[in-house]
Image: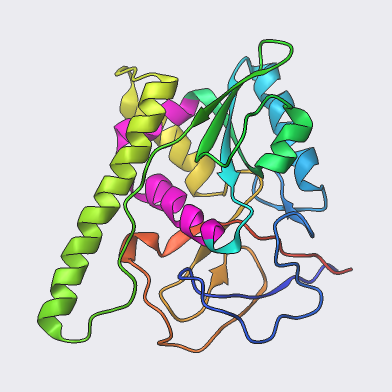
Amino acid sequence: MNRRIFLGATAAGLAVTAWPAFIRDAFGDGAACDMNGKPSAAPPVAQVSAAFRRAQQAGKALLVFVIPADDSARWERGRAFGELLNFGADRDLAPLAGVEVVCATMADLKKIVPGAGAGEPLMVLVRTDKVPAAATPLDASLPAYKSGRRLDRSSWEQQQKDEEKIAAQRIGALGDLLRRALGADERSVAARAAGVRARLVKQPPAGAHWASSSGCGTTIEGVEENGMVGCGMGHVPEKSRRFLYFFSVEQRG
């Protein structure tokens, strides 16, 4: 029987004091997820290849949520995508109905799509109907949260309001990016958004896990055992508490 154990850091990027030897702390070193969010032994590049084929067979484009190489950037980007998928309005999510979505590093993407481009944009849109496949980077500037939690009540209440405003700005920026790249078709918006939520919110996109943290450790959904770090060590904005986890969890036989 496979046994998967994770000892995590908070979404704020807290350091972990003792990683088990069999946990890989970089995406792609261990098992990831298949198209249904189930643990898979397939390496990340194989998941990109499979997603490309699914998109091609369905006559769709492939949208890649880019996983940064830097660990801290992975936490931040996973939070941003989590905010979009969990709290985006129908019009923000509806454009995703027409694409196949996968999470991957640029290094893995380039093994399948050599012309994917440079840098680490938020997303890359790959047109699968041409050979070689045409790729377009999609990028935007997202406002950052202020770190730490304010202690007195009035400051804490103001911080919550500030974080709500920043979350709305981040979701809005990502939604606008998707509408500009994929189109802003106003037909059946609610139905298309519902389909996206069923496909990408109930289960994670291929190449990622859903995880959650409120500043008291990180829990990865679908993992049988989860380690925790000390409570009260970090603060996570409310809409960032469920996020895409871009590190792999290794399976043990």
From which residue to which does the magenta span run? 73-97
128 and 199: which one is in front? Answer: 128
Q: Is residue 166 visible?
A: yes
Rendering coords of residue 8 (x, y %):
60, 75
Question: Can you say whether 38 is above or below 212 in the image?
Answer: above
Q: Quadrant of residue 20?
A: bottom right
Q: Is residue 35 visible?
A: no
In percent of the image, x 69 and y 52: which residue is there?
38
Residue closest to the far left? 154
Rendering coords of residue 239 (x, y %):
34, 59
34 and 109: which one is in front? Answer: 109
Question: Can you say whether 48 is above or below 129 in the image?
Answer: below
In percent of the image, x 44 and y 61: which residue is there?
242
22 and 118: which one is in front? Answer: 118
In percent of the image, x 40 and y 87: which residue is there?
232
| Image quarter of the C terminus | bottom right
Residue closest to the far top? 130
Look at the image and say whether residue 233 sits in the magenta stretch: no
For the rendered model, the colour scheme is rainbow
Rendering coords of residue 65 (x, y %):
56, 41
Count of numbered tags: 0
Look at the image and say whether residue 82 sits in the magenta stretch: yes
Query: Mainly helix, strand or loop, the magenta region?
Result: helix
| Image quarter of the N terminus | bottom right
Rendering coords of residue 221 (x, y %):
58, 63
Question: Can you say whether 142 is above or below 64 in the image?
Answer: below
**Residue 39 in the figure: left or right of residue 196:** right
Question: Can you say whether 163 is above or below 204 in the image?
Answer: below
**Residue 196 in the figure: left or right of residue 132:** left
Q: Quadrant of residue 139?
A: top left
In percent of the image, x 81 and y 74: which residue is there?
22
**Residue 99 in the figure: left or right of residue 104:** left
